[in-house]
Amino acid sequence: MELQKGRKIFFVSDSHLGIPSYSESLFREKKLVKWLDTVRSEAAVIYLLGDIFEFWFEYQTVVPKGFARLLGKLAEITDSGIPVFFFTGNHDLWTFGYLEQEIGLKIFNEPVGISCNGKSFLIGHGDGLGPGDLSYKIAKRAYNSRLLQRIFSYFHPGLGSKLVSLFTKKERYSNRSDLQAVVDPLNEKLVAYCNEILQSKHYDFFIFGHRHIPCDISLNGRARYINTGEWVNRFTYAVFDGNDMHLKTFNE
């Protein structure tokens, strides 16, 4: 893939729309829509790197309530010919065709490698990668079970949403005490994952979400791990301008 002059690739993740309250979620949704309006004039491709929604489950004839502004804007962008790729996160992995058919998104469930302007990228949400987290990796396999998905689909949507809310720690999204957190490269699972991949294959950029802490870390002098951060408090994103990757904060 080669970018046309003036075109860029944008990456954003972890807006967790739907919590901790309707008004706070709506504020972030409107801000995300404004960001999409801002970048679309330069965008060759837009990557949504997971956990855009706090909860998403598509029943055969029902989809989660809300998010009309965001979904409408995404449909408008894909209708204009700009590809939008959606990587499922650990909160919005249950997609079964609606986002592709109605909104025009292209869905990915695992990290994907691409090349652009002579640079190589490995892109994904980031959950369940790297050492440790065995209990979550087992749970993720269960979440992807067709049997579990079928059982959940038999619940009334209202009941299903309430069941999910029992496992959601809403208070952590309204707590701003983690804003000074930084990534320790020696103990970061995604850094370990990137270094493991580099032993057998080179990528110039590893781009993930999930961790909520924006960072740009050199791995071996040639590769970089970049985390897009989140849209709960920081409103950060990443952009490839054709030559290099940059982390930015959206200020209206």
Image (tube, helix red, strand yellow):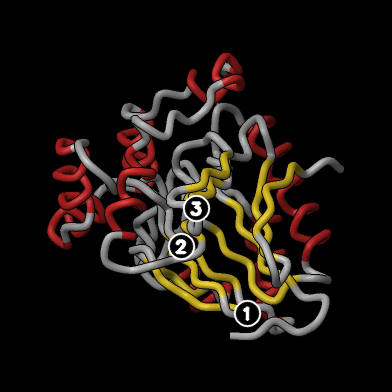
Of pointers 2 and 3, the one earlier in the residue sequence: 2
Tell me where residue 20 appears, x and y as whole percent.
55, 27
Q: Earlier in the sequence, mark 3 or mark 1?
A: 1
The crowd level at tag 2 (other Cα within 10 Å; few <14, some 14-19, many 20+) is many
Q: Tell me how many marks there are.
A: 3
Q: Nearer the viewer, mark 2 or mark 3?
A: 3
Residue at 82 percent across and 76 percent down: it is 6
Please tell me whether residue 63 is drawn above or below residue 53 in the rendered image.
Answer: below
Reading the image, the residue beneath label 1 is: 117
Calculate the distance from the C-alpha at mark 3 to the C-alpha at mark 1. Answer: 20 Å
State the mark number for residue 104. Answer: none
Amino acid at the residue labelled 3: Gly
Instruction: Tell me: residue 180, above or below residue 190.
Output: above
| Residue appearing at x 55%, y 39% in the figure | 18
Nearer the camera: disc 2 or disc 1: 1
Q: Earlier in the sequence, mark 2 or mark 1?
A: 1
User: Toward which corner of the image does residue 166 lie, by quadrant?
Assistant: top left
CA distance separating discs 2 and 3: 19 Å
Q: CA distance from mark 2 to mark 1?
A: 16 Å
The residue depicted at 59 percent of the width and 28 percent of the height is: 21
Dividing the image into 4 quarters, which one contains the C terminus? top right
Front-most of 113 and 99? Answer: 113
Kind of residue sitting beneath label 1: Asn
Q: Is residue 39 above or below residue 212?
A: below
Where residue 25 appears, as percent x and y from the top left, is: 64, 36
Q: Looking at numbered disc 2 in the image, what kind of residue is underneath it?
A: Ile
Residue on which the image places disc 3: 221
Which disc number belongs to residue 123? 2
Picture coordinates of residue 38, whole percent (x, y)? 83, 59
